Image: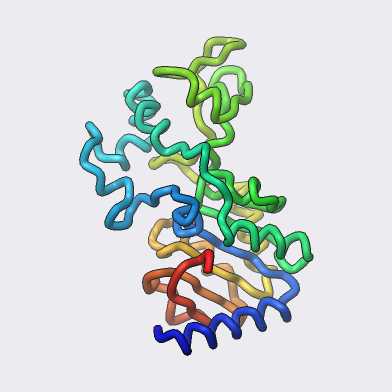
Amino acid sequence: MDKHMLNENHEELAKRILSAKHIVFFGGAGVSTESKIPDFRSADGLYQKKNFPYPPEMMLSHSFFERHTKEFYDFYRTIIFKEAKPNAAHLKLAQWEKEGRLAAVITQNIDGLHQAAGSKTVYELHGSVKRNYCQKCGAFYDEDFILTNEGIPHCIKCGGIVKPDVVLYEESLHMDTINKAKNAIQEADMLIVGGTSLVVYPAAGMINYYHGDNLVLINREATSFDNRANLILKGSIGE
């Protein structure tokens, strides 16, 4: 996309945002990479690294958590980026919500950066590293508890194993979150999809609940939904 076309599309996006009253943003890993959190599937993503004893997809599965809990946590701690800060995209979305333009953020990310930027209505399809619960008594623990405990973290109240509130492979998405996200998309007069290749299901299938005529896609690469978009911008979500 040439610079002239990109500028025209930026102007068109700004115009659409100013006229919209119920924007919903659906975001993926590309929203977090600009905060220096690596994604999983790109050429330099976590899945391409070869220094893991098992494939990352396996280590982030429910069965691996159950059978190899210590090894799970050895890997899991490497994908918690506590020092990451919200970037321009996170901050702008929070501003739109405060202005009453944006109704909700729906994210596939687990880093909590939307809330750190000030967003209030955030539906985390895959959970969050910020929340961890004892499997036995339900006691809550933050990410510091996970990071500062070696090996398997155990509840200080009952001794149970603490599990991240993150949707692992082989686990179902939380239906309450799904239903709230679906309703938000159905009610949106503008849906902005950013920083996601839309290949991870069932999360990517959420886009199908939007039946309006104001679908905007912002991504570095083409997606399978490009033919359905009313406006496409190729490039950085922060920009």
Q: Is residue 183 above or below residue 75?
A: below
Q: Give the left or right position of residue 228, taking residue 131 as reference.
A: left
Depth check: give the residue in front, 175 or 22: 22
**Considering depth in this image, is 14 or 103 the residue closer to the camera?**
14
Q: Position of residue 42 (x, y in %)?
A: 32, 57
Percent position of residue 72, x then y: 36, 28
What residue lies at 56% left-to-right and 47% top-to-bottom? Answer: 85
Examine the rendering and report whether any part of residue 107 can be seen. Answer: yes
Residue 99 horizontal side relative to residue 78, left or right: right
- Residue at 64 percent across and 74 percent down: it is 190
- Quadrant of the image occupied by residue 19: bottom right
Q: How is the image coloured?
A: rainbow
- x and y, in percent, of residue 189 in the image: 68, 75
Residue located at (39% from left, 51% from top): 39
Q: Quadrant of residue 13?
A: bottom right
183 shown above or below 45: below
Say which residue appears at 48% left-offset and 57% top-offset.
28
The percent position of residue 69, horizontal first and vertical second, equals 37, 23
Q: Nearer the viewer, residue 92 or 186?
A: 92
Quadrant containing the N terminus is bottom left
Visible in this render: residue 183?
Answer: no
Q: How many numbered marks appear? A: 0
Instruction: Classify residue 96 by image quadrant.
Output: bottom right
Instruction: Name the side, left or right, on which 45 lies relative to 37.
Output: left
